[in-house]
Amino acid sequence: MTRLRGLLLLLGALTLVAPLAAACDDDQDKVVHDRFTTFLADWRKADFSGFPDLLTPQGRTLDAAAAKELLAGTEGDLSARRPELTPHGKARLQASDATLSVAVAWTLPDGRKWAYDTAVHARLLGKRWQVYFGPSTVHPKLEDGQHLSLRATPAGRGKIAAADGTPIVAETPVVYVGVEPRAVPDVPDLVAHLGDVFRSVQADVDVQGLPAKLQAAKPDAFVDVVTLRRTDFDEIATDLNKTPGIRVRAGTLSLPMTRTFARALLGTSGPATKEIIDASGGALKAGDVAGLTGMQRRYDTQLRGLPGVSIAPLDARPGATPGEPLFTLPAQDGAVIATTIDVKVQQAADAALAGTGKPSALVAVKVSDGTVLAVANGPGPAGYNLAFLGEIPGPAWPADPASLGVGAKWSLGADVFTGRADANGVTAAPIGYAAAAAALSRGAWQEPVLVKDAKAQPGAKVQGTLDAPNLAVGVRDGIAYCAYVTDGTSQTAGAIADAFYAAVK
C-alpha cells in the first residue's frame, strides 16, 4: 500500500510538471518572438533605439549608435533605401539558441526588386535573449568589413519616331567644346573669336558669360561652352583646334534629325540637372543623361529604359574591387515613342518659318482622323512650344467652344493649352485653331493626336467657318493648318501658310 501511494504521488508530480514545462516553452517562444519583432522593426527604419545591447557575431556589444553606423556602412549603396523584412514563420529554438529566417526585399532606384533570404540569430545569455547583428545578417554572403556595392550600366536611349517609323530623335554623335582656363592667353580675344566661329554655323551660343566662368574655375578645369552635333563641329573644327585653350570631347546625345526639326516639340537631352535628379527618386545621379525639354522630358522614363544592375560585396579598403555579384539585372533599352509626325510635312513647316524674325508657329492636322502632321516654331526660346502653349486671343467661334474642345482635357501626348472662352471670344493655341478648323471641315469634333497610343475621344457634330484675325487658319487638300506670327497680320501668316503648302505638294 505504501509503495502504491508513492507511485501515485510520483505520477501526480510528473503530470503537474509537464504543463509547467510547456508553459515555460511558450513563454520563451513569446520572448524570442518579441525580441526578433523589435529587431526587424528597428532594422526597417535604420534606428536601433529599441536595442541598446546588440552583439556582433564575435560577441562584442553594439550600442544603438554603433549598430546604426554598422548597418549604414554594410548596406552601402542601398543605405538610403529601406528593405521589406518578412519573417518566414516562427523562430526555431534549440536549447539556448534561436534562429529566425527572414525574407529581404529591396526596391532598387529604377523600381525593380531584389529579394533573398537571410537569418537572424539570438542566444539566451543569463536570463536575456541577445540578438546578434553583423554584415552576414544584412546578406548571408557578406563578410566582416564588406558592404553592398551597386553598379549600374546605362541602357541604350530610346527613339522618337515619325508616322512611317523613321527615327526623328535618336542617338547622335556630338562634340563637347570647352575651355581650359590656364591655356587661354587673352580672354576677350577668345570670346570675340568664338562668337564669330559659332555664328558661322548658325549655332546660337552665348559666350558673354565665359569670362566669369573661367575666372571661377580651377586652372585645369574643362569649362563647358557648347555641345555641337559632330556635323556642325566638323565645319569649324579647324578654327577651333587652332584656338588656344579650346578642348574637345566626343560623345553621343539623343537629338532630333536636324537642329531645327520640330525642335521645341521634340526637345533636347543632356546631363540631368539637380532638379531632375532630385525628382527622379534615386533613378538618376550626377552625370546621367536625361530629357531636358519637350517630348524628351515628358517621355524620359520610357526613353531612358532600365540600366543594367550589379550588386556585389565590396571591401572598405582603398582600391578594392567588387566580389562575385550577388544579384544582376540586364539593361533594357528605352522604348520607341511613335508619333504621327510626317517628316516631309514637318520639314516644309520648319522651312516656312525659317525666314521669320519673330516668335511664330505653324501646326498641320490631318482632317480625316485628327493626327498631327507637323509642329513648327520659329525664332524664340528653343524650349518653348508656342504652337501648343501659345495663348492667342480671337473672336467667338461659330460653334459652342466646348464642342470644339476648348478648355477640355486632351489626350494629345504632349503638354498643351486647350484654350478658354469668355465674353470677348476664344483664346487658343495654334494647335487649338488647327484642330477646330479640322473639326468644322469634317463636321464633328475629334481630339488631335500626336502620340499613336494616345486615347483621343470623338465629340459632337459641329459646323461653321472659323474667323481668326491675325492668323492664317484653314483647310487645303485634307490638311487643316494654323500659321501665326507674333505681332503679325493675317497676310503675314498667310504668306507662311502659302510657302508651307507649296513645299508640301
Image: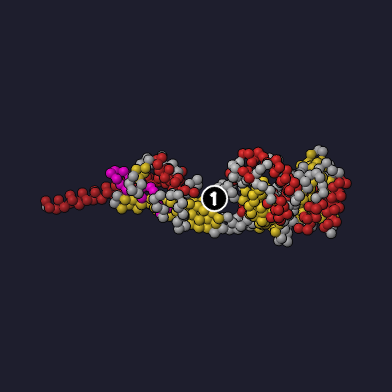
Query: Can residue 451 be seen from the camera position used here?
Result: no
Secondary element at image label 1: loop
Residue at image x 74%, y 53%? Answer: 261
Residue on which the image places disc 1: 109
Viewer-side residue, 131 vs 15: 131
Query: Can residue 121 be seen from the camera position used here?
Result: yes
Residue 174 is situated, as x and y percent measured from the top left of the image, at: 67, 54
Amino acid identity at mark 1: Pro
> Within the magenta stretch, is there residue 173?
no
Residue 400 is situated, as x and y percent measured from the top left of the image, at: 80, 45
Residue 264 is situated, as x and y percent measured from the top left of the image, at: 73, 49
Q: Which residue extends farthest front?
A: 185
Residue at image x 80%, y 44%? Answer: 358
Residue at image x 61%, y 57%? Answer: 156
Question: Dot 1, how many residues are within 10 Å of its Cα: few (below 14), some (14-19), or many (20+)?
Answer: some
Residue 253 is situated, as x and y percent measured from the top left of the image, at: 65, 53
Magenta stretch, residue numbers: 121-140
> Within the magenta stretch, is there residue 138?
yes
Viewer-side residue, 9 vs 35: 35
Identify the image quadrant of residue 423: top right
